[in-house]
Structures are given as structure tokens and as C-alpha cells.
Amino acid sequence: MMMRTRFLLPLAWFLGCACFATAQEAIRLPEAKASTGSSVQRFEFASDGPKGPGWTRPDQIARVYIRESLPALFQRTIRLDDDMPSTGKLSWIFTGPRAGLTVELTKSGVRLYERYYDSTGLAETGSYPEKIIRDEARAYVGHPRLLTVIVDAHLSVRVLLNGETMLTEPLVFDLTRHQLMFSGPRNRHLTLSGDLLEDRPIDATVTVNPGKAHQTMIGFGGSPSIPAYAQLSEEGKQQYWKLIHRFNLLIDREYPMGTELKQDLSNVENLHEATPHYYGDNFPNSEVSDFEYSRHIRELGGQVLYEMWALPHWAIQSYTPQGKPIIDAWGRPVRSAAKPDVYARIVVEFCRRAQARSGAAPEIVGIQNEVEQAPEIYAAMTTAVRKALDAAGFQKTKIQMADAPYVWMATGRIRDLKRFPNAWKATDFTAAHQYDYQGFLANPDLYDDRLREIREASDGKPFLATEICLNDSHFQEPSYRLALQVGQLYQKDLTEVDAQMLLYCWLLLDVEQPTFGGSRSLLVPDRSQGQIPVASSFQLRVLGAFSRHVLKGMHRVETSVDNPDLLTAAFTDGQHSSVIVLNRSTHSQRLHLDWQGTRWSQMERTSFYAENEEKDLPQEMVIQPGEIVTLSNFRAN
């Protein structure tokens, strides 16, 4: 739960994409290749033609409204019959729920600009708020016949003329509709006509090899803010548990009492003494436990992961490194360390209380969350906890290594821990938070090297992906497009590091400032509807595309695909089977699935327009760009 991050790459990428200046030399267009696509919609404009009907546009030519809902990712091409008129302008207008972009084409240049219109804080002039946030133009020489707009999985938009890239800009918001507008002198007869070309599905085959098995799944989940949960109405609590059950988010990652914890642990469930956790100007979401919550999770078949963050003052001591100083994730030198035996006593006492109040001790104990310790301290904490748990009768409770905020840092911790054989032997799971993934959101495949490194370092120990959210301000847009990028990480975690567990940062968070909810939590309390939980953004449905049909105890089996832009993962327990397919290309895919001996009955669609909609299997399986499809032989909750 990183409070802040230091990412240079996202900012550099955002600034670097706006690299086409108007002062550049004009591009000489290549000849347009013959287009084979058929027309979806014809358009014909005349500058002296009849004005459009209705009001607010007293003398404008009628626009052409394209009859489709745009997928999250797309490639759309207009074929022009002739050159642009000398004084005419074609505007291709794309709109979404919060923002839009416009491509303008004239006789000598092309322009691309993005604008937000979702807040009165953007109001400048006119009858509605609007503010242009990016604006680029490029001159050309030649005969434009094909105008293409590509919105892709690299969080960008590209404009091409005759196949030549003219403009590129970052793009994080959603677009859902588009239209065409032509403008020119009303006293002259200037014409422009053409066609919007169709997007044809591409055939793709996914082959499953059930004989090649990988990890066995523990499950999905995250951390509930217990104060936020306590604020829910009784109806809200009932709806909350229905959502937890529906989305199969049955791993309760405790966010327990930390610095304010009393030595006898008597306040471990005391809301009034909870350690506050601050996000911006939101009310605190405090560190505290609720054993009744844990009991309910277990009644649904879930598990509890216990891991402290900052320790109370009586559990730490001053620390002076021998040699090179130890620097934490925020660039600060480490000057304190845990008292391993005291820490182990806290863990055991918590397990006793959890067993008495909720029916069982935590299934997993994490050594510490995002607090830097010297390697020898981590090792001592690990062995002390294992020894104390065994002595207290909690031999079944497993140990997860200390969580680092970044995968690269976690890899270093693993290498350090392996220098202490007893501590490494006592470690059941390697783990990492993945906030460094935000530096790769525009190019997720570049993150693969870090995932391979941590897998190799783990030496066969199972891996837990214990925390992810978007806390970089560049990416706190509540769009499906950004949630889809996080979905790519889920697939990579499952298939490249064999993660047995995927956890979002918060399951429920109390917020006033909406960007904190939409980026950091799956659910937020809706006070306007009687304190009921609602999805904060599209993150819930994207995680649900994976979690709903991957049950505890299912193991992953090998998949192969003939298209690198289809990300896949398949699971089975011998009775239940499922395949998840994420289409990150800009074209729809006609899916052919080869898993011998498996009969599919259900197909679940997840997209901007569909919240985990499960239906009977259709005769033809077509996956839209940016859509996630889950095939299964069973119905989810």
C-alpha cells in the first residue's frame, strides 16, 4: 500500500509521445494501397448543401453519426474518394463518458487533439465545460486516401495517412462513439465523400495441453478497510458479502493494528485505537482487525493472510549497519530494526486470538509489509516466527517472505534471504507487490524480464502476487483501458511466475476523492445510496474475469496461441475447467479452442459494456478488441 512512488518512466513516456511538433517538415505521403475492406457506412458532404436539422448549429452541414459502439481498443479507417477540398476540413470526432479526441484533416495537414469535458473545473467559455489537454499537428504533401485512427493497448492513439504514421499521443480515457463533420465555405460547392471500412475478425486458435500442469491456485482477494466495512449499512454488508462471493475474492489479507498496538494485543480489534492510514484529504482507513469478518470469509471457503506493516515502538530497536547503509524504497536510510523475538510473540498471540474468535489461525503469515529491514533481521524474524508458531501448535500456518513494493526489490530480498539457509528453508512463499509495473503500463511485455528474474530467484518456491493498484497520478483515470492493462499483469503473473494468489490492494476503501477509490480499491461505500458497496471503477470486473472461474484447488495447464496479442490462461481440477482469453489487439478475433475431451457450456464477457456477463456458449466465438472472454464448463457464483 505504497503512500507514494518515484516513477520516472511513465512521465518520460507521456512527454515523449508528444514528439511531433508543428514546426517539423511536411511528410510526403506514400501512395495509398488498394483497400480490400468493404464499406460499413457511406458519407457524402457538400459545403453548400442543406443545413442539418435541429437547433444550436444554425448553419452547419448535417453530421454523419457512425452506428456502432466502439470497443476499448480499435483500428478504424476512412477511405476518401478524392483529395481534400482546398478550403474544407474533415473532423473525425471520438467521444467517451469523460473525454474525447478529434482528428482534423485539411488539404495540407492533420491535427489531433484530446479534450476533457467532465467537470465544471474545466469551464472556460461557451455553454459547457471543456479543456484541450493535448494538441499536435503535422503537415503533409500528397494525396490522402486512407485516414486511420488506432487506439491500442500501448495507452496511445495514432493517426495514419495512407498507412504512414503522422501523429501519436498518449491516451488513457475510454472512447465509445464517433462521428464525422465537414466544414467549408457555404457559398462554394466543395464536396467530400468516402466510406468507413469494416473491421474483419481474424481467426485465432488456442490450444490447451492438459498434461502439462503448473501451479495450484489458492485464490484471489485483497485487504478490506475494516473502518469502511463498519460504515456499511446492514443492507450494505449483505451486498458486500454477495459481491465477495460473486467475484470469488476469498483471500482476506489482514491490514492489522501496527504502531498503536498494545503489548498485550488487547486493542487488536478496537476501531477507536486503530492506526490511521491517510490518503490525500480522505478520512483515515485505519489498521485494525475484525475476527467476525475473518470468520465470514472462512464460512465462504476463504483464507486469511496476516502481515503487519510498521511495528509498535516496543517491538523495534535502533540499528546501525555494518558497512554500506541500507536504503528503503523512499530513499531513506534504515536506522531501526525489528526485535525478532518480540515480533514472533505478536504473531503467535494474534494467531491465538484469531483461533479463539474466528475459528482458526491465519493460514499464511507475511513477515512484514513494505518496511525495509537488514537482511539478517528479515532472516531472524523468519526463523523466530517459525519456531514460535511450531511451539504454539500452529504448524499448519505457512510463512510468506517480507513484501517489497517492487518486484525488482523483492528479487533482491530473495537473494539476500537465501544467504541464510534456515530462514530460506522456513519460507514457504516468495511474494511481491508490483508497483513498478506502472512504469511499464504502456509496454507490459517489457515487464516480463523482471517476472522471469523473480521466478528464477525463487528456486521453485510458490509465488504470491500480494498487492497491485495504480497509485501513480498519471494513471488515475477510472477507465476500462487502464483496468485492461492491469488485466495483462494478472495474466502474466499467472503464466510467467505461476502465481498461486492474486491480491488487489484494497477490497473496500472509504474515500471522498474519487481517484483514490478508482485507483486503489475495488469497492467503495456509496453514501448516496444508503452506505452500500459499489464498484469504484472497471478494476473489479477485470479482476473478476480471472477470479470468478478460477477456483481454489484448480491448477493451471499449458496453453499456446497463434496470435501474441491474445493472452491466455487455462485451469482445471478434473471437474471444473476454464480458459481466460484477453484480446489486446485492435482487431476482433474469431476464436477456435482446442482442448480435447472438454465440453464448454458457458462464455463470460468482460468489457466496457459488459460486467462479467455469463451466457450459454454461442456457436461462433468472436472476441472484441480489449475484451476478456472466459470459457468454462460450469457456472460461476
Image: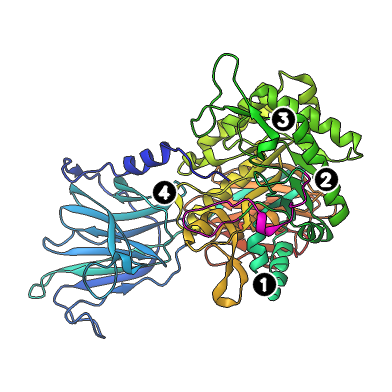
**Residue 496 occupies which quadrant of the picture?**
top right
- Please tell me which residue lies in front, 112 or 338: 338
Say which residue label 2 marks.
351
Magenta segment: does it hold 284?
Answer: yes
Whether residue 603 is visible: yes
Q: Residue at x 31, y 73 (%)?
A: 64
Distance, label 1 to label 2, CA atoms, is 29 Å
Instruction: Tell me the amino acid under the disc marked 3.
Output: Lys
Element type at mark 1: helix
Span highlighted in magenta in the image: 264-285
Element type at mark 3: loop
Instruction: Tell me the amino acid under the disc marked 2.
Output: Cys
Distance, label 2 to label 3, CA atoms, is 19 Å
In the rendered image, residue 153, in percent from the top left (x then y), is placed at 47, 49
The tag earlier along the polypeptide, 2 or 3, is: 3
Whether residue 212 is visible: no
Say which residue label 4 marks.
474
Report the number of numbered marks: 4
Distance, label 3 to label 4, CA atoms, is 39 Å
Distance, label 2 to label 4, CA atoms, is 40 Å
Instruction: Tell me the amino acid under the disc marked 1.
Output: Gly
Say which residue label 3 marks.
339
Instruction: Give the side of residue 132 with respect to residue 443, left or right.
Output: left
Q: Residue at x 92, y 39 (%)?
A: 393
Q: Tell me, yes or no, whether the two marked residues, 1 and 2, touch with CB atoms within 8 Å.
A: no
Q: On screen, 40 above or below 498?
A: below
In the rendered image, residue 422, in percent from the top left (x then y), is placed at 80, 22
